[in-house]
Amino acid sequence: MNKEPVDQEVSNQIGVNSAHKAAFVHQAPNIVASNSSKSKHYRSKLVRVTPTGNATLVLEYMSKCPIESKDAISALSRARSKECKKDITDTVCATSERNLYPLSLPRFCPFTGKYANEIENDGKFMSMDQPRARIAYVLVVHGRALRQVRRLIRLLYHRDHFFYIHVDQRSDYLHREISAISERFSNIRVTPWRYATIWGGASLLQVYLRAIDDLIQMKDVKWDFFINLSESDFPIKTNELLVAFLTKNREFNFLKSHGRDDSSRFIKKQGLDRLFYECDNHMWRLGDRELPQGIHMDGGSDWITLNYEFAKYISEGDDSLLKGLKQFYKYTLLPAESFFHTVIQNSRMCDSLVDNNLRVTNWKRKLGCQCQYKHIVDWCGCSPNDFKPADFYKIKTARPAYFARKFEPVINQEVINQLETWLYGNYPVGTPAIEYYWQNSFHEQDTTTVASDAERTFYHAIVRLMAKYINIKVKGSTQEKECRFKVMPQPFQVHYIFRHDSFHGLVASVSGYTDNGQSTLMEAWLSPHKPYRVVSEIGPFKRLVSMEVGLVFDPKERVFRKFEGVIGPHDDPTIFIKWNLGEAYTVTLTWFDPTDHIAASFDTGVEHDREETHHKPEFNKPIRPGKWTIKLLFNWMIVAEIDFLVVPLSIKNGMTIKGAGGATVNNGPTNNEYVSKDFSAMRYMFTLRDTPALLVEAKEKALKQGPALLDWIDSELESFWNVMAFCTSSPSQPVRTKMSDLEEEEEQQCEHFRPCEQQHWSSLSPDPKSELGPIKPNGRIR
């Protein structure tokens, strides 16, 4: 039996590395069915063999041909569903038979080599007798940045343009809200179909192709140009300038190429010579492949501006070039970055290409190229950074450019405000919410994006904190009776709130009703306190800027994407430290659990030019709930420390914990071992409490249930969160009272409950910069 070693990627995926000294062998496939030469099927196995000769079956699969590619075997070992595994083997076999896509295609462009026009930005307006160019904006959006999407539409809107919006299949909240917007405007529609797109996947190209098909078939919609945008794009010139430019250049298509005459380097860098297939929300690399002969391969940015004629050809063209390329790009990494370029370079319309996509992209390769997408694609890719005020100069480019990316108000809204002011002038003095931004983080109607058990536990707890705060505020007042409210046990939605680009806390929206039965909506603003403490002003203290602990660290933007920082027993907390430039140091990060047990300790170097350190230990789960502390040491002296909370769970697998169910999630790891190494020898260096006694107490807490469990959760949470204010969606209904039969009834209402619409922090307060108001006589909203 032949044996073939499996590459390291497979070994890592199944939890084995060279330290285990175990080998992986791919056994030669056996033919299991053979009615004819065309119906052979092969059964293959991937086996783990220990040094003692013990074999463990890791993978077994059927295929129509022998699978020999290490990339394909790696993909099969990691794919989850049977359907995905079958698609992978079918794709590999079709490639080996050379019939997956045409290996030769015709070139219809009459020019040799790479063709492209150059158009200067002459700044002249169109003549009044020219029909204005009409734009079909195709917005492909995902996530929860509703207010930024509304702001983008607000600036682009004109009654002559059309907006066709695809919302990712996993973005329930955004789809509901944008669907509601589309009901208000006849020229805004949401695609009736939805894909779950991934970075680099073939699905994104399918979204664009299907959107173009729909636009061509819409007989009631007239348009001249197709422009694709995301929620991270923003205009850098006014609508009038864009329309004037496109009106004068109707015959052109605007795509940015990779910029090299020799495409061989681009082909390698882009992975065009590799076979890929998308399934199980992953883009799998399956091995090398042949490229179609006879054509010029091209590519660059997937942000494009196409005229109607070329879009119609893409949709309805029936020649072998177009059909062959559509088939080829189903199995291509980052297909949207190459398909349109390759089609136009080889079509009869090649002379309509302008090597400029009319965009400015904020590339910072050192930060943006960190293989941050390897969990969804077998490739290292790059992504642009968000614009910040220091990047504003890049927007003022001499070449024709009308959009820039990326912009995220949760990262920096100041630059967005600056850009809008630059285009359209300042908002009137006194306009509310200019420095505020709200973004939804939870909604009870979501079905695909479901909150974790820790998040749901947290949301229930903040409602109890809110009720406690309100009771303290009104207790003993003359209106105590009028201020009685009953609320639902969890908020129906939660928003992040930012002010001046700093995370300001959470706004929780809760349904409730008064003593007299009137239903109302209440909101509370909760603010976290996550201060780190400086203990000794020694060594690296002078370089220390900040310390944070959280989840989902983004190394590109250097922030935690889970801004509220709710950490549960099954999560992986990360510490993030910002540094000033200066002298190099070696520091130690020591982690203490709620029983003062040293869970882990790690050394890390801080080079003279290093601006950040982030580290995520691989702890055994579950980690113990309660207050944790991380101490930053230099020469074994404490420089600074920070506390963070691991929330005890009251919900497990979406259900309220009952009986002794909490003991399995709230009792810490087996034998109190977080990692394989024992750090007890370090205890003498610190002033610590009695861990054995605290461990007994912690085990008793883990057995809590019902009200006792909720009290424990609330007491922990109160150490990390404050309720700052509360409001109702409208003043509470007046209560009719009279002191005696001789007195007339008088109206009273709870003065503590202010209208949310008048509270600057409330998600219900006015936000003019993101509101889609009435259409003006000139056809615009802004």
Image (cartoon, rainbow, N blue to C red):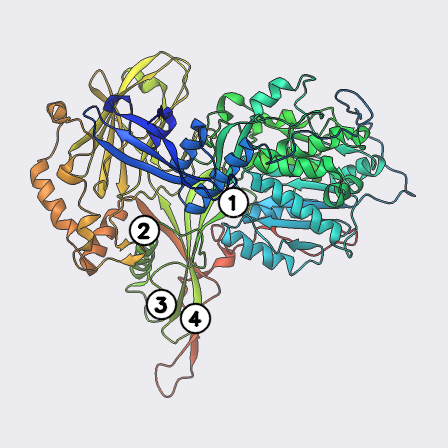
Circle 3: element type: strand
**Of the residues under marks 2 and 3, which one precedes in the sequence?**
2
Which residue is identified by label 4? 519
**Of the residues under marks 2 and 4, which one precedes in the sequence?**
2
Which of pointers 4 and 3 indicates the residue nearer the eye? 4
C-alpha distance separating marks 2 and 1 = 27 Å
Is residue 437 something one can see in this rendering?
Answer: yes
Q: Is residue 257 left or right of residue 670?
A: right
C-alpha distance separating marks 2 and 3 = 27 Å
Which residue is the extreme one toward the front?
35
Which residue is identified by label 2? 453
Who's the residue at 72% across and 33% down the image?
A: 343
Which of pointers 3 and 1 indicates the residue nearer the eye? 1
Residue 446 sits in quarter:
bottom left
Circles 2 and 4 in contact, beta carbons < 8 Å: no
Which residue is identified by label 1? 437
Which residue is identified by label 3? 485
Circles 2 and 3 in contact, beta carbons < 8 Å: no
**Of the residues under marks 2 and 1, which one precedes in the sequence?**
1
C-alpha distance separating marks 3 and 1 = 29 Å
**Of the residues under marks 3 and 1, which one precedes in the sequence?**
1
Please state which amino acid type lies under the numbered disc 4. Ser
Residue 301 sits in quarter:
top right
Q: How many residues crowd mark 2 within 10 Å: few (<14), some (14–19), many (20+)? A: many
Q: Pinpoint residue 381: horizontal percent, then vertical percent.
A: 51, 28
Which of pointers 2 and 4 indicates the residue nearer the eye? 2
Q: Pinpoint residue 310: horizontal percent, then vertical percent.
A: 77, 39
